[in-house]
Image (tube, grey):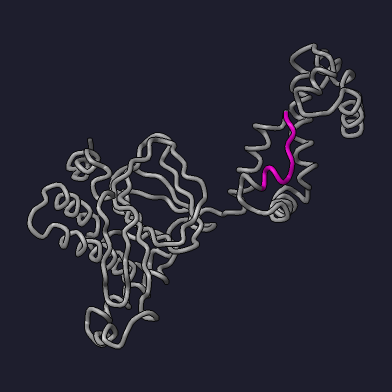
């Protein structure tokens, strides 16, 4: 346990707050709490790209990792928070050598003004009504990058957990108030974080190109298509083809895959004496004859001639 790590106790009953049916009315909004917990990502854990129809607030309590929000990648460390609103595609990953703990508040916020009666809208000019509207407006427009938890929303998770566990007088009302505090403190953090728009990010074109090559190099021996790789990267085949042409000297996907396979073929020709048919089967070529034709066209010699040259030290 990290020194002074106060959220460890929340892992003792990780579903304590989840068991509560937390619904609250705040101004014109009905807020339903869907998730409210501490979760731990073991080293290297990946949560693949996904999205929700609701709001999810993420606070990093311990460890480090990264998040991709739509198509921008950001490093995460203790004290960071980020918000994913309805429809925002995101990807999460813990550092490969260090676990990452995240405090999560996942809420569905429904505007009831269209269903309200005249008496129910009588508070439209109240401070609470106005603050609720302002907070939800800010949630919907929060920029897609992490901020620092500068207004201390994270301790509210622990306070809510302790209220739930101790069942003291007014604990349910206290927990509902803490949900609102987390929402308010999260949006307030972004009011003073404009400078963080310049947080270091990766060049996503280069990053996706690198991931595509890694996947192809790991799977060249089998059947692999442009569509397969694009699906792994969660982009369209056309987008991936453009990336290769732009970042791989104008080469198409097919040409890049052929290059990878031929590199493997040459490596095998240099190190063993298996038949051309066997090498073809291990490197993604349909037959030895097809490999022979492709190899000769690319290198001006047959695979057998290349092997002889390599073994004689003449390459």
- Residue drawn at x 72%, y 28% as measured from the top left: 221
Q: Position of residue 3 (x, y in %)?
A: 19, 39
Q: Position of residue 43 (x, y in %)?
A: 40, 35
Residue 116 picture quarter: bottom left
Vertical arrangement, residue 76 with respect to residue 272, above or below: below
Q: Is residue 155 magenta?
A: no
- Residue drawn at x 30%, y 66% as measured from the top left: 189
Image side of residue 199 versus residue 265, left or right: left
The count of marks equals 0
Residue 170 picture quarter: bottom left
Q: Position of residue 164 (x, y in %)?
A: 17, 51
Vertical arrangement, residue 280 with respect to residue 238, above or below: above
Residues in magenta? Answer: 222-230
- Residue drawn at x 45%, y 51% as measured from the top left: 67
Vertical arrangement, residue 223 with respect to residue 176, above or below: above
Image side of residue 159 versus residue 228, left or right: left
For this rendering, which residue is in front, 247 or 100? 100
Image side of residue 184 versus residue 75, left or right: left
For this rendering, which residue is in front, 56 or 81? 56
For this rendering, which residue is in front, 15 or 290? 15
């Amino acid at each position: 346990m990290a020194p002074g790590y106060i959220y460890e106790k929340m892992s003792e009953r990780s579903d304590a707050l989840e068991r509560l049916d937390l619904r609250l009315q705040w101004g014109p909004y009905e807020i339903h709490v869907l998730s409210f917990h501490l979760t731990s990502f073991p080293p290297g854990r990946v949560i693949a790209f996904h999205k929700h129809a609701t709001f999810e607030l993420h606070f990093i309590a311990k460890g480090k990792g990264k998040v991709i929000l739509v198509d921008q990648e950001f490093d995460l460390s203790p004290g960071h928070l980020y918000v994913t609103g309805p429809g925002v595609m995101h990807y999460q990953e813990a550092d490969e050598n260090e676990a990452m703990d995240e405090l999560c508040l996942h809420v569905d916020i429904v505007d009831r003004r269209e269903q309200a009666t005249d008496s129910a809208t009588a508070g439209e000019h109240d401070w609470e009504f106005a603050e609720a509207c302002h907070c939800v407006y800010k949630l919907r427009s929060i920029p897609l990058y992490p901020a620092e938890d500068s207004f201390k929303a994270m301790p509210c998770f622990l306070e809510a957990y302790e209220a739930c566990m101790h069942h003291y007088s007014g604990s349910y009302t206290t927990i509902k108030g803490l949900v609102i505090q987390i929402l308010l403190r999260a949006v307030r953090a972004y009011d003073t974080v404009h400078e963080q728009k310049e947080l270091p990010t990766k060049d996503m074109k280069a990053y996706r190109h690198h991931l595509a090559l890694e996947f192809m190099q790991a799977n060249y021996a089998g059947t692999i298509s442009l569509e397969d790789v694009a699906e792994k990267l969660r982009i369209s085949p056309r987008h991936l083809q453009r990336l290769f042409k732009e970042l791989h000297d104008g080469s198409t996907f097919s040409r890049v895959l052929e290059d990878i396979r031929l590199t493997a073929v040459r490596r095998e020709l240099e190190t063993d004496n298996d038949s051309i048919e066997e090498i073809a089967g291990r490197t993604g070529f349909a037959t030895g004859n097809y490999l022979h034709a492709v190899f000769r066209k690319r290198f001006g010699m047959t695979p057998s001639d290349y092997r002889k040259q390599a073994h004689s030290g003449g390459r």
